[in-house]
Image: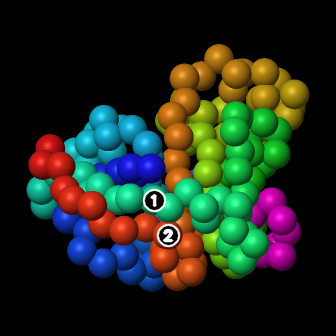
Amino acid sequence: MKLYHGSNVEIFEIDLKKCRPYKDFGQGFYLTTLPDQAAKMAKRVSRIHGGTPYTTVFNFDESALNHPEINTRIFKVPTKEWALFVINNRNRNFNNHSDPECNFDCKYDLIVGPIANDDLALLFRQFSNGLLGIETLVKKMKYKKLTNQYSFHTPKALLYLEKAGVLHD
């Protein structure tokens, strides 16, 4: 399977220490199956941080998803569990790192699921501030058009990625 990563630099080697924390699924290397989504991210990152938009293409060995030594978490659609997982990973004050509903400690090597876009971020803030209950949050999430992401959190998960090229945006 092809996966795409949008950035302001071409990716030659993945360094997990350079990945930003407090992302949807925790600190990790994020990719998508959608080249257009990666290209949009590359342009956005380049606008913010400078550089040139690059979409680096990777071949992903899908056997990782079922490999017994790779701890994988898959969210097929937005659910209450997915929303709480994303909220916890984005929360700089969440400190229960052993909680299965966060990935601060990289307990999950590989996570697949929807992207929490800006519309969802607003809903998450409303929920976190007590303005929405969990049932209302889940109900409102169903009407949002979401795209996917694959996040790699450990060196052993990265072994299932191989650089396949670059698309110039």
Q: Residue at x 26, y 68 (%)?
A: 11
Q: Observer-nearest residue: 113 or 84?
A: 113
| Element at label 2 | loop
Query: Which mark, by number, is residue 7?
Result: none
Label 1 crowd bin: few (<14), some (14–19), many (20+), radius 10 Å: some
134, above or below 26, in the image: above
Q: Residue at x 61, y 51 (%)?
A: 112
Tell me where the magenta segment starts and ends, as one range.
96-102
Which corner quadrant of the image does residue 50 belong to?
Answer: bottom left
* Residue for badge 1: 60
How far from the left and from the top, in percent, is residue 131?
78, 31
- C-beta proximity under 8 Å, tags 1 and 2: yes
151, above or below 129, in the image: below
The answer to whether residue 150 is seen in the rendering is: yes
Based on the picture, tell me whether residue 58 belongs to the magenta stretch: no
Q: Observer-nearest residue: 166 or 44?
A: 166
Going by the numbered disc 1, the residue's amino acid type is Phe
Q: Observer-nearest residue: 166 or 141?
A: 166
| Element at label 1 | strand
* Residue for badge 2: 160
- For marks 1 and 2, the one nearer the N-term is 1
Which corner quadrant of the image does residue 104 belong to?
Answer: bottom right
Q: Residue at x 83, y 65 (%)?
A: 100
How far from the left and from the top, in percent, is residue 37?
36, 38
Left or right placement of residue 109 versus residue 145 in this view: right
Going by the numbered disc 2, the residue's amino acid type is Tyr
Q: Predominant secondary structure in magenta?
A: loop
Label 2 crowd bin: few (<14), some (14–19), many (20+), radius 10 Å: some
